[in-house]
Amino acid sequence: MQVDQTSTIWLAVGGILVFIMIPAIGMLEAGLVRRVNVINAMSKGLMAFAVFLPAWFAVFPLYYHGVLSDGFYPTGEGVGVPMYVYGFFIGAFGAVTLALIGAGAPERLKFGGWLIFSLFFSLVQWPLVSSWIWGGGFLSNLGRLLGLGDFGVLDFAGGTVVHAYAGLAGFIITLLLGPSLRRTRLLTNGGLSPLIYKEHIEYKYAELQYAILGTILLYFGWFGFNGMSTVTVSEQSQYSIGNTAIAGSLAGAITALLSRIHEKTWNPVAIMAGLLGGLVMITPLAGFVDIWASYVVGVLAGLVSYYGMKFMERYYFIDDPVGSLPVHGFNGILGSALVPVLAKPGLAPFAGLIYGGSPAWLGVQLLGMAIALSFVVATTYVVTLLLVKAGFRATTEEELVGLDVVDHGVERP
């Protein structure tokens, strides 16, 4: 097999763009946590490189053998992308997922515990789940296995494999770690509601400029994330890029307006949540839908991101400063579920329901998502519970001082 030069360059550049998203996630978290945990937040991003990539390149050929041929990922008759270039592109998605989980579970898991979880994630958990859908695994052939036709779980660039995965895993870790000490004291002794706490107390202790810059860099990298997941340069590429730009931007505008209506201010955290939520929801759809669908997705994502965050802040006693569950979890799940509804014939392998497609595909998609995400939730729960029992949850004293000092020996003036 010969090298498909155009596709190889396309994926190499795409992997580099996705790579930029990993430190950007660290900046996003650093801008939304207490100042005594900023270095810890950004260090977790560094370890998403340092732990995941060596592990991934060691195990990638084992998990993805179903889509590889003679050391290549085939892109046409007798041509393909060299295996390790393709592996780099896919691996960057895995490192992003790990960084997102870390951002969704900040401030209370000590660095040693995070490294242990990262090893499990890198060697077992993410390679398994991603290969089930992207590596020719059983979820990509679920319809055939169930006798429902050729339908399988489709995920263009990671609605389930990256975002719903990270949102739910981060939620489970945060749930088991429990609320932060500062939040507990203010809410129980100070008589503050979770929503007032979030809007008027927590943000005062954050460095929002880091979060804003992190969001901008994430948006930049997302064009490699979605735009180059076509693998080859084709007509589909214009849809994956155009849909990404429209959905992310429109959702940000929606949340900006909602914050002005409800909060009487242009809340920068709401705007960031909308931008990212729109990018998340369009991710599993980007190359499968017509341009008009991105406008629908943008509006839906804006509503889900804004009201999802408010719901979590008002009714759930849990720390999620980056909005990982509503922004990534909710939007990732809804976007993935919409694939069999909005998929356009000619762009996707099957027609969505609005084009007269089969309801069986929707059933297969939802069942496959449930299987993959149930595995993520169950395994994350077990590993995190073991870490908590082993003493990797920060103590009261450690939490007060902050993980920058406790884990990294860095004390800010």
Image (cartoon, helix red, strand yellow):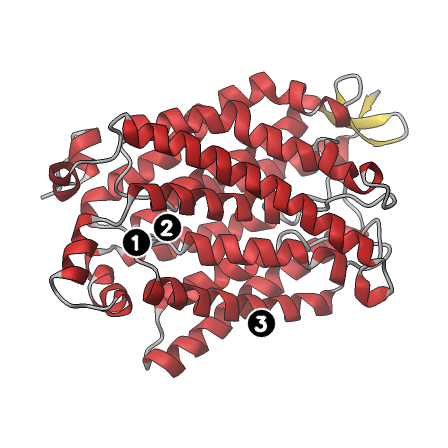
Which of the marked residues, 2 or 3, is nearer the chain's N terminus? 2
Gap between marks 1 and 2 measured at Cα: 7 Å
Vertical comparison of 180 with 136: above or below: below
Furthest residue to the right? 77
Q: Residues within 10 Å of mark 1 (few under 14, many from 20)?
A: many
Q: Are marks 1 and 2 in contact (CB under 8 Å)?
A: yes
Which residue does the numbered mark 1 point to in the structure image?
A: 32
In this view of the protein, can residue 19 be seen by the observer?
Answer: no
Q: Are marks 3 and 1 in contact (CB under 8 Å)?
A: no
Residue displayed at 58% across by 69% down: 300
Residue displayed at 68% across by 44% down: 368
Closer to viewer: mark 2 or mark 3: 3
Question: Which part of the image, by quadrant, shows the N terminus?
Answer: top right
Q: Residues within 10 Å of mark 3 (few under 14, many from 20)?
A: many
In this view of the protein, can residue 401 be seen by the observer?
Answer: yes
Q: Name the kind of residue labelled 2 in the image.
A: Leu
Nearest the eye: 222 or 197: 197
Vertical comparison of 107 with 71: above or below: below
Q: Name the kind of residue labelled 1 in the image.
A: Leu
Q: Residues within 10 Å of mark 2 (few under 14, many from 20)?
A: many
Q: Name the kind of residue labelled 3 in the image.
A: Val
Which residue does the numbered mark 3 point to in the structure image?
A: 299
Q: Position of residue 373 (x, y in %)?
A: 57, 43
Gap between marks 2 and 3 measured at Cα: 23 Å
Question: Which part of the image, by quadrant, shows the C terminus?
Answer: top left
Assign a secondary structure to mark 3: helix
Q: Position of residue 3 (x, y in %)?
A: 78, 25
Query: What is the total number of numbered labels drawn onto the structure image?
Result: 3
Residue 7 shown left or right of residue 349 in the figure: left
Gap between marks 3 and 1 measured at Cα: 25 Å
Which residue does the numbered mark 2 point to in the structure image?
A: 28
Examine the image and state in which quarter residue 404 appears: top left
